Image (spheres, grey):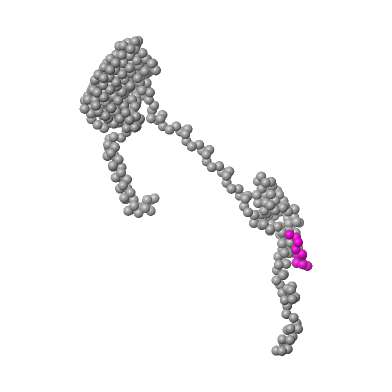
């Protein structure tokens, strides 16, 4: 084995992979397998703004109320408005807007029809509770209440595929629980759909032919007919106010601002280094005869600006302050500087260095026999006496 995994023993990697595979398989089985993968909403395009959209005619009886657009294309006959009313939308008859909506409806119908079913359902959906998925049947009927459970996921999608007809009974209902949304319920109908008297229906019907809503039926969704008519009778149709999945994502403006980075100005200044030369030379040492060297013995190049003088030391006369500060400075004011290599050395500097050298000579001379204390030397008389006795 090569690469980053080469340093891990095989007996560690293999069991780890085995556990991962086992957990993945278990979750897949519990979730219902790959076929139960989450469905995306059916894309309605511009048809999404319509509460009612038909191909041939739109006919209304009684005080129906539509919340959303009303459209017809290519037909031109819309009757029954008033007494029917349209709110929160516009009426489009045989114009470019209605034509585009019909084209988008065809695309959406084909999308819903082409999805792979996750389950096959019998004709009657009444009394059942279904989780998100794609449900297919040759014909679909609803007598009683159908419950759609999103299991806490507001983006969960339900798609129903009726091979031919969808018929709901009187006073039937579709109930949403578990955060299910009418925005994500779609009914693809292979021919025509009929909603029973006083039924309560949820979802968008995409019918190949026509849609008929009997007296008093209410819809939280859309009635969309590709090739036929939409017929209403004292109904309430409310288009869902949906937000797309991309719009619900966390806004990018919530990203952590880059200005929160640690400023570089917080670095410790290099000028805080402790100076190496802490002793100030004194001129109190008494020179001894010719021990003092001449000034020509000290080349100017032997003094560099690297010698540091503590910030608290008094300024020595003759030292230049034009070559930068030594031992700090900053807001405390200009520091004391030393001449750079090759620059002339002032007389006070030379005197100070001579004093240091004289001090060193004095220390060395103190230990030489020629200048030692006379009291430590053996007397001449004692030496003669010892030689005589010997």
Viewer can see residue 231? no
Q: Would residue 378 appear left or right of 34 to someone viewing this image?
A: right
Image: 211 above or below 306: above
Residue 333 location (% of width, % of height): 69, 46
Q: Quadrant of residue 121?
A: top left
- Quadrant of the image for the C terminus? bottom right
Q: Quadrant of residue 224?
A: top left
Image: 302 above or below 41: below
Q: Residue at x 32, y 32 (%)?
A: 151
Q: Residue at x 63, y 54 (%)?
A: 274
Q: Residue at x 75, y 67 (%)?
A: 291
Viewer can see residue 199? yes
Residue 170 location (% of width, % of height): 25, 19
Residue 355 location (% of width, % of height): 74, 61
Residue 288 among magenta residues: yes
Residue 208 location (% of width, % of height): 27, 21
Residue 109 among magenta residues: no
Residue at the farthest bottom position: 389
**Span of residues in magenta:** 282-293
Q: Would residue 78 appear left or right of 287 to someone viewing this image?
A: left
Q: Residue at x 67, y 57 (%)?
A: 278
The foreground one among 55 and 278 is 278
Dominant secondary-structure state across the stretch colored magenta: loop
Q: Quadrant of residue 122?
A: top left
């Amino acid at each position: 084995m090569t690469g980053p995994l080469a340093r891990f023993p095989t007996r560690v990697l293999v069991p780890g992979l085995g556990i991962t595979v086992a957990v993945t398989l278990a979750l897949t089985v519990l979730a219902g397998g790959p076929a139960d993968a989450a469905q995306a909403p059916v894309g309605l395009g511009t048809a999404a703004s319509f509460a009612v959209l038909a191909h041939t005619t739109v006919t209304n009886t009684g005080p129906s109320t539509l919340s959303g657009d009303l459209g017809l294309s290519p037909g031109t006959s819309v009757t029954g408005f008033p007494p029917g009313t349209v709110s929160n939308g516009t009426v489009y008859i045989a114009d470019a807007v209605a034509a585009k909506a019909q084209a988008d409806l065809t695309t959406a119908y084909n999308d819903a029809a082409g999805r792979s079913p996750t389950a096959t359902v019998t004709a009657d959906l009444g009394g059942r509770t279904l989780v998100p998925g794609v449900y297919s049947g040759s014909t679909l009927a609803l007598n009683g209440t159908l419950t759609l459970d999103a299991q806490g996921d507001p983006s969960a999608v339900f798609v129903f595929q009726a091979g031919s007809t969808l018929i709901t009974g009187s006073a039937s209902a579709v109930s949403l629980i578990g955060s299910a949304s009418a925005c994500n319920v779609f009914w693809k109908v292979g021919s025509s759909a009929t909603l029973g008297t006083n039924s309560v229906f949820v979802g968008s019907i995409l019918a190949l032919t026509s849609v008929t809503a009997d007296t008093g039926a209410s819809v939280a969704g859309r009635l969309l007919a590709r090739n036929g008519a939409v017929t209403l009778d004292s109904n309430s149709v409310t288009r869902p106010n949906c937000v797309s999945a991309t719009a619900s994502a966390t806004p990018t403006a919530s990203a952590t601002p880059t200005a929160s980075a640690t400023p570089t100005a917080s670095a410790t200044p290099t000028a805080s280094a402790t100076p190496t030369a802490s002793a100030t030379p004194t001129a109190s040492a008494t020179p001894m005869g010719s021990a003092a060297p001449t000034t020509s013995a000290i080349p100017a190049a032997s003094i560099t600006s690297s010698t540091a003088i503590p910030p608290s030391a008094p300024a020595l006369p003759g030292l230049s302050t034009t070559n930068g500060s030594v031992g700090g400075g900053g807001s405390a004011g200009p520091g004391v500087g030393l001449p750079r290599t090759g620059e002339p050395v002032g007389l006070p500097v030379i005197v100070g260095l001579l004093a240091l050298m004289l001090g060193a000579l004095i220390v060395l001379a103190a230990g030489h026999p020629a200048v030692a204390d006379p009291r430590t030397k053996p007397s001449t008389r004692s030496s003669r006496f010892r030689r005589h006795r010997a």
